[in-house]
């Protein structure tokens, strides 16, 4: 499981880095085109917007997998360790359900609804743009399952199974 997580981490951080580099290049080009060369570059602004959608969702999935997301631990820490474990498990199941229903299932429906539509300046299919939602949902589900399995293995080691 740890190897899978490492591969996912590297894939997501590399993809997010490439998207960020592209956004910077397009932004610099847009400024140069507008203010130095006095020409318009309508496709770059739209491209940056769509790259930002992919960047934001892939980075959110990576942050989720790295356990660097916002968590409210104040309430959970007031309970016994056994209750805390139960709360974690219930939370993990809820995360999987929400990611599966809202991000994956809902995202696929949005992709199917918008796949025939194209962006005005670039001609990119909006289905490709919105595909970031189910893709990041799948990554979040995988990270949650890995986390649950890792917790289970650690529990068994502590108990001596």
Image (cartoon, grey):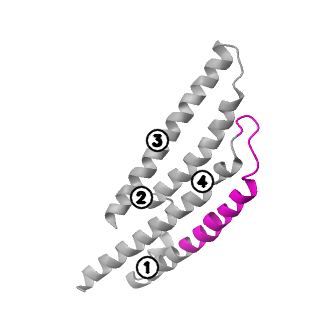
- Secondary structure mostly seen in magenta is helix
Q: Where 58 sits versus 153, above or below?
A: above
Q: Nearer the viewer, mark 1 or mark 4?
A: 4
Left or right of 6: which side holds 118?
right
- Residue to which mark 3 is pinned: 17
Mark 4 or mark 2, earlier in chain: 2
Mark 2 or mark 1, earlier in chain: 2
Q: Where 29 sits versus 87, above or below?
A: above
- Identity of the residue drawn at 68% across and 42% down: 124
Compute the Cα span from label 1 to label 4.
33 Å
- Identity of the residue drawn at 50% across and 35% down: 21
Callout 4 environment at 10 Å: few (<14), some (14 to 19), or many (20+)?
many
Q: Nearer the viewer, mark 4 or mark 3?
A: 4
Residue 27 seen in the figure? yes
Look at the numbered disc 1 and give the secondary structure of its residue. helix
- Picture quarter containing residue 146? bottom left
Look at the numbered disc 4 and give the secondary structure of its residue. helix
- Residue to which mark 1 is pinned: 84
Kindly check if marks 4 and 3 are in contact, taking CB atoms under 8 A apart as contact.
no
Mark 3 or mark 2, earlier in chain: 3
Residue 72 seen in the figure? no
Look at the numbered disc 3 and give the secondary structure of its residue. helix
- Residue to which mark 2 is pinned: 66
- Identity of the residue drawn at 58% across and 74% down: 97
Residue 24: x %, y % from top left = 54, 31
């Amino acid at each position: 499981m740890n190897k899978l997580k490492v591969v996912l981490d590297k894939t997501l951080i590399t993809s997010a880095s490439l998207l960020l580099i592209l956004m910077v290049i397009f932004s610099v080009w847009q400024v140069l085109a507008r203010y130095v060369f006095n020409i318009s570059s309508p496709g770059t602004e739209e491209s940056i917007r769509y790259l930002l959608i992919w960047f934001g969702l892939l980075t959110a999935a990576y942050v989720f997998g790295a356990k660097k997301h916002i968590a409210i631990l104040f309430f959970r820490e007031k309970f016994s360790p056994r209750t805390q474990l139960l709360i974690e498990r219930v939370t993990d199941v809820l995360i999987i359900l929400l990611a599966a229903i809202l991000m994956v299932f809902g995202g696929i429906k949005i992709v199917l609804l918008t796949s025939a539509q194209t962006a005005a300046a670039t001609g990119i299919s909006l289905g490709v743009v919105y595909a970031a939602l189910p893709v990041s949902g799948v990554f979040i589900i995988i990270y949650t399952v890995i986390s649950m399995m890792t917790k289970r293995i650690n529990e068994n080691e502590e108990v001596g199974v």
